[in-house]
Amino acid sequence: MFGDFYFDCCVSRHLVIDFVLLSLSSLYYQDIIVNVALIWTDPYIIPFTFLSVRMIPTEDASARKREIEDKLKQEQETLSFIRESLEKSDQLTNGMVSILSSFESRLMQLENSIIPVHKQTENLQRLQENVDKTLSCLDHVISYYHVAKDTDKIIREGPAGRLNEYLVCIAKIQKAVEYFQDNNPDSPELNTVKARFEKGKELLEAEFRSLLTRYSKPVPPILILDAIGGDEDIEVQEDVTLEHLPEAVLQDIICISLWLVEYGRNQDFMNVYFQVRSSQLDRSIKGLKEHFRKNSATTAIHSPAVQAKRKETPTKKAPKRPGFDHDLRGVKHLSDDKHAAVAGKDDVLDVEIDSYIHCISAFVKLAQSEYVLLTEIIPEHHQKKTFDSLIQEALDNLMLEGDNIVSAARRAIMRHDYSAVLTIFPILRHLKQTKPDFDTTLQGTAASTKNKLPALITSMETIGAKALEEFADSIKNDPDKEYNMPKDGTVHELTSNAILFLQQLLDFQETAGAMLASQESSSSASSYSSEFSRKLLSTYIYKVLGNLQLNLSNKAKVYEDPALRAVFLHNNYNYILKSLEKSELIQLVAVTHKRVESSYRELIEQEIQNYQRSWCKVTEHLTERNLPALMPGTKLKDKERQIIKDKFKGFNDGLEELCKIQKVWAVPDKEQRDAIRHAQKRVVSDAYKAFLQRCANISFTKNPEKYHRYTPEQVGDMIDKLFDTSA
């Protein structure tokens, strides 16, 4: 009857509780195990409980009941405690709500009392502020009426020595002017402060001019030379800074400039600025030029910068005539006095050239320095125009001097003084080297200003090219004047001058080539390059040498003696060849004409042979022509004896005559002179020895010493004395 059973169902929780209580009251089950599972499917649906009941019958049901009753009692006590706690909590909550309600009521009463007071206080504060502002404005306005009186003393005394204080006073006056213009334009006070403002502005302008004039000084020449004379060989080269104005003065000038631009609305001070600084720039360059003139006796200026600069821009060499072993006897030279005068003139000319070259560099350096100074003082949008005006005077003077150099060269060309045109070469080369810096410095100036240097360069190139072409023509057309020919057949003055001129071109190869290229109208000239100009210069030198050779051939015809004519041409050709070899001219000519050296050697050898023919009238007496059969012991007829006598006499007379004539001729080149003597001595001596051997032991006269005057050794000694006036 008793046993375990399980009852699973889905019931309401009320049913579960009733069921549990019913089971607990049953005496037939020891134990009831209730498993309750609540399923909350929805908050609005009554939850159900899954009830699993296990009834376990037992004999000790009463004990189990007591245990359950004890637990129930404990739960009931806990429930009573919770209920008491909830009642206390409700009491505290009601008390707190009462307190908060009382606080809210009192707070509302306080707010209703304070807000009107706050608004009233705020209105009072606003009224106080308005009163203070009104009083401040009144004080401010009243101060404008006293500005003229308060600033009178400072304005009358001027800004000298107290520029900042003066500018403060000017600012006060300016504000007063603005106030009266806006608020009371008809008041007499406006005219007063306006007049005071204009007076103050005039004094500022006067101070600007005064400071600029008083402290602007020409840059000393030595400082300029140090600034432009950077030597690339020196490892450490310090930049020389050109300080035109003391720093304190510069700052005052800048302040005045800024004020005049911003408040004075005046640009007249810019005209003052460029006039003063332009004058100082021109004076600085003139001072440098005067420095060179004063030191003309010692052209090599002691400043290392100048010496370095002279290395970069060498001037025309002194007119020294190159020779062979310093022995050019017979070359037509100037007299000592005239030569000294020309040398002195050339020294002065070198100083003038050097001076102009340095002045060009000085202008660029000083102009750059002036532009840096100008940017600190002149407003940006006026800087280029002011700078353009500032440099005009100095630039125009330099360009005028350059034009004078071109004019002098043009006059020299008209006088056929082509060496004078060499002064253009170092100047032109330096102008071209300086042109990039020149263009950079003049960037932003007017086109007329930037074109002045290119125009001068073009002018110099044109006159230089003209001089080169006319020089070549003059070499070709130099007249054959008999009195101008060297009597001893040495090197002609035309030859030495031509070679000297060409040698001086070596220092200016690129410049001379560019001159020639500038006159070319071909398409190759338009694609100008250094190689093209070098070829043009090579062709030009070859042309001059060709003209010189042609002219020398014509001049040689002046000599009646063919031997002297040969010696003359030999000396000149040999002089040309040696000069070409000693310089770089031979390499330069070889650019376009490879055989120039061999051509001159052939000409020299040809003239030596022409000279040797002059001895034929001596050696022809030693030939066997018309000579009778000479046998030892043979008795000669009178006619045969006379033939031998005539041969001896013809040889002796011819030898003596030639030696006498040719002894005063000149062959300056020792090597050539010895070679000619040796060759001639060998030919004549050998022929004379052979003749003497044939005539040995032949009795053709009772006085043999009368005909046999010289031994072969004596003949050789006589030939060794040819071309030697001291013998």
Image (cartoon, rainbow, N blue to C red):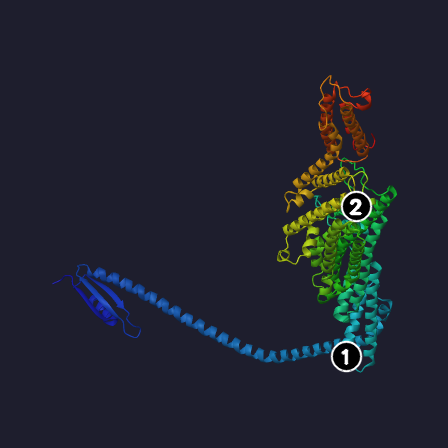
**C-alpha separation, residue under disc 2 versus residue under disc 1:** 63 Å
Within 10 angstroms of label 1, few (less than 14), some, or many (20 or more) residues? some
Disc 1: which residue:
181
Q: Using the image, tell me which numbered label, if any, was put on residue 387.
A: none
- Among the 4 quarters of the image, the one containing residue 106: bottom right
**Residue at 27 percent of width and 67 percent of height:** 38
What is the x, y in percent for residue 140? 77, 75
Task: Report the front residue among 413 and 250.
Answer: 413
Q: Which quadrant holds residue 464?
A: bottom right
In the rendered image, the residue lying farthest to the right is: 337
> Residue, x 72% and y 31% (percent of image)?
675
Amino acid type shown at disc 2: Ser
Q: Which of disc 1 and disc 2 is earlier in sequence? A: 1
Closer to the eye: label 2 or 1: 2
Residue 520 x, y percent position in the rendering: 67, 57
Q: Which residue is mark 2?
A: 303
> What quarter of the picture does the N terminus occupy?
bottom left
Q: Amino acid at mark 1?
A: Gln
